[in-house]
Image (cartoon, rainbow, N blue to C red):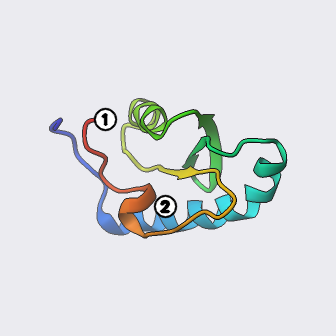
Amino acid sequence: MRNEQMPSSDVLESEIDGNYAAFMEKLEGLLREHRSGQFALMRNRAIVQLFDSAADAIQFGRKAFGDHIFSVQEVRERPFDLGYFSHGGPYADI
């Protein structure tokens, strides 16, 4: 694992919660665009970019955002929210 400063859990949890709420508002439109199965990289309650794999989204997020404050959510008809580690948190070297 890289020796990088990770954001506090409070900061990251707040980002994840806000991103998830924003994602849910956009989900119907994403599904109409046939985006099911893709992964949304989220930051500041906005979709930054869509990726074909979670690993690609995480790698891009880590490079683009040195503070590691972002989350990833799968575009699917019934998204699930398992909390902190389901779509955010300190990602291992992926």
Please state which amino acid type lies under the numbered disc 2.
Glu
Above or below 72: residue 94: above
Quadrant of the image for the N terminus? top left
The residue sitting at 37% across, 45% down in the picture is 68
Number of dots carrying numbers: 2
Q: Is disc 1 placed on a helix, strand or loop?
A: loop
Name the residue beneath numbered marker 2: 15
The residue sitting at 44% across, 69% down in the picture is 82
Mark 2 / mark 1, whichever is N-terminal: 2
Horizontal arrangement in the rendering, residue 47 relative to residue 65 (left or right): right
Above or below 77: residue 30: above
Please state which amino acid type lies under the numbered disc 1.
Ile
Name the residue beneath numbered marker 1: 94
**Pointers 2 and 1 in contact (C-beta within 8 Å):** no
The answer for how far apart the CA atoms under marks 2 and 1 are is: 21 Å
Above or below 94: residue 29: below
Above or below 76: residue 83: below
On the image, the x and y values in percent for residue 87 come to 45, 56
